[in-house]
């Protein structure tokens, strides 16, 4: 008799969620908008589970941080594809209104995706983690009871120090990007260099903790080599193919549905399309949190933010120049300058929250409320009250100021924690450079 609790049953279930979309792709005849959204949504859901299992299985052979970094890159690959599309169109139509609009859309989509990742991702996962523990018999060691109003916190492992530090470096540089008149070669070199250095350090340092997996990852980890590697690569490849082919029609389907409801197209491209493209990452993190692996979940979220805030920005200028046939910075207008500053400011504030390796319920709610307030106000200014005294550009600068003031106050208050982050990162970097200096040990 078939044991429904067998790990392969779960794998088969995830694969079945993707099969209808595979059939659509093979037949080459796409159904209507609503059906497309349904089928692609199921495919993304199934692929997200396969992707998470592949990353967890890979932790048997590579550093966990590297496995989660690979997961983060694959999960947000559709976002790269969408932004590359707009950057390419900007290049081939350079010097025309259509080219400038495409360049602005590339920036808008990129900044929207980054702010969603923190505003909804970081805050939502923190709230879900605390809620899950409060309403479940299963406890998560990462959730701590704190005295005070909404003070219960998700406590992160100090092994995340390297990710936080490198995201801090990328965020600091991002504030200067608008002053260059566009995303240029210097931005590409610095931001891609930051990410490449981060990957080099986590691979060579290899600071790890022993963690026993259960379910599908534990089953596959029992396989010997080279079969385990084949399984991991197969799951990564299949889930990446599903995500890459399904997320774009999923996002466009949601855009079409939104446009039918009268939502402005620019607003849809900045918010609805990135929300769809970020869905695999959020599904994976919810899965990890549900397994009481909150630290791994936040590590994945921070890795996603780091690669989007470095590789995604850096590669836009490369794609634009290739399409143009010559080197040139990717241009953007004054509103997109403000969008970049706001995105950097939000990242600055979010890092000031995580710098002490905790995020409380009230801090998560602050992130969520500020994000939703900005999006709602911008929608109202575009659609409902376009004649309001403050412009959309002015509103972006106001929220930038709020984030910077709050973040600066927290960093001053937690300056010792920031110092500890930098010390831990320096120790990990020294371990990567010289085996004589072992990396710091962390408790999960």
Image (cartoon, rainbow, N blue to C red):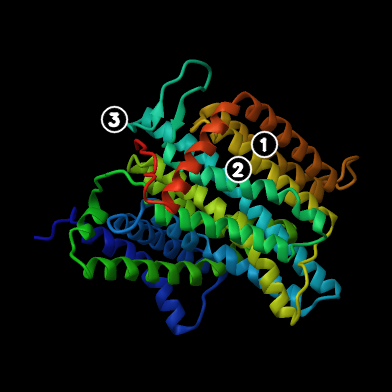
Query: How far apart in space, not on screen, are marks 2 and 1 (Cα)?
Result: 8 Å
Q: Residue at x 86, y 75 (%)?
A: 95
Depth check: give the residue in front, 430 or 126: 430
Q: Which residue is mark 2?
A: 119
Q: Residues within 10 Å of mark 1 (few under 14, many from 20)?
A: some
- Label 3: few (<14), some or many (≥20) within 10 Å? few
Q: Which residue is mark 1?
A: 370
Q: Earlier in the sequence, mark 2 or mark 1?
A: 2
**Residue 161 in view:** no
SS under mark 1: helix
Question: What residue occupies the far top of the structure in this picture?
Answer: 147
Q: Where residue 102 appears, x then y in whole percent?
A: 75, 69
Q: Which mark is residue 7?
A: none
Of callouts 2 and 3, the N-terminal one:
2
- Residue bearing mark 3: 137
At horizontal 38% and vertical 33% (from top left) the residue drawn is: 142
SS of the residue under disc 3: loop
From the viewer's side, name the closer residue of 355 and 219: 355
Residue 90: x, y in percent? 75, 73
Horizontal and vertical percent position of residue 229: 28, 67
- Separation of marks 2 and 3 at Cα, in angstroms: 29 Å
Packing grade of label 2 (10 A; few <14, some 14-19, many >=20) is: many
Tell me whether the residue at label 2 lies in contact with that at label 1, contact meaning CB atoms closer than 8 angstroms: yes
Relative to the observer, which residue lies in front, 311 or 137? Answer: 311
Front-most of 123 and 209?
209
């Amino acid at each position: 008799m078939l044991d429904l609790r067998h790990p392969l049953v779960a794998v088969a279930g995830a694969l079945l969620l993707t099969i209808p979309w595979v059939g659509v792709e093979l037949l080459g005849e796409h159904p209507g908008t609503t059906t497309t959204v349904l089928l692609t949504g199921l495919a993304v859901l199934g692929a997200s589970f396969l992707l998470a299992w592949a990353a967890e299985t890979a932790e048997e052979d590579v550093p966990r941080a590297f496995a989660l970094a690979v997961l983060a890159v694959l999960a947000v690959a559709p976002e790269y594809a969408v932004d590359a599309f707009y950057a390419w169109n900007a290049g081939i139509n350079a010097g025309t209104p259509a080219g400038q609009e495409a360049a602005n859309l590339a920036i808008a989509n990129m900044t929207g995706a980054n702010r969603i990742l923190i505003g909804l991702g970081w805050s939502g996962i923190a709230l879900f983690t605390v809620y899950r523990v409060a309403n479940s018999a299963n406890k998560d060691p990462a959730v701590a009871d704190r005295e005070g109003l909404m003070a219960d916190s998700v406590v992160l492992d100090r092994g995340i120090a390297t990710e936080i530090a490198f995201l801090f470096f990328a965020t600091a540089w991002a504030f200067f990007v608008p002053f260059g008149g566009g995303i240029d070669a210097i931005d590409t070199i610095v931001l891609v260099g930051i990410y490449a250095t981060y990957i080099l350090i986590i691979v060579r340092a290899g600071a790890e903790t022993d963690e026993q997996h259960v379910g599908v990852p534990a089953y596959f980890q029992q396989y010997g080599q080279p079969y385990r590697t084949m399984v991991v690569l197969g799951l990564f490849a299949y889930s990446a193919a599903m995500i890459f082919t399904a997320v774009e029609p999923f996002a466009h389907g949601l855009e079409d549905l939104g446009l039918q409801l009268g939502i402005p197209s620019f607003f849809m491209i900045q918010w609805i399309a990135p929300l769809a493209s970020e869905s695999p990452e959020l599904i994976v993190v919810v899965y990890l949190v549900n397994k009481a692996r909150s630290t791994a979940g936040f590590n994945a979220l921070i890795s996603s933010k780091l690669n989007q805030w470095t590789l995604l920005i850096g590669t836009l200028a490369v794609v634009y120049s290739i399409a143009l046939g010559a080197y040139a910075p990717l241009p953007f207008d004054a509103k997109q300058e403000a969008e970049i500053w706001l995105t950097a400011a939000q990242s600055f504030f979010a890092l000031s929250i995580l710098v002490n390796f905790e995020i409380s319920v009230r801090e998560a709610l602050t992130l969520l409320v500020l994000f939703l307030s900005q999006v709602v106000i911008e929608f109202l200014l575009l659609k409902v009250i376009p004649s309001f005294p403050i412009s959309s550009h002015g509103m972006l600068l106001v929220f930038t100021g709020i984030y910077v003031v709050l973040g600066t106050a927290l960093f001053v208050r937690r300056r010792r924690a920031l110092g500890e982050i930098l010390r831990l990162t320096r120790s990990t970097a020294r371990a990567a450079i010289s085996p004589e200096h072992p990396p710091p040990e962390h408790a999960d």
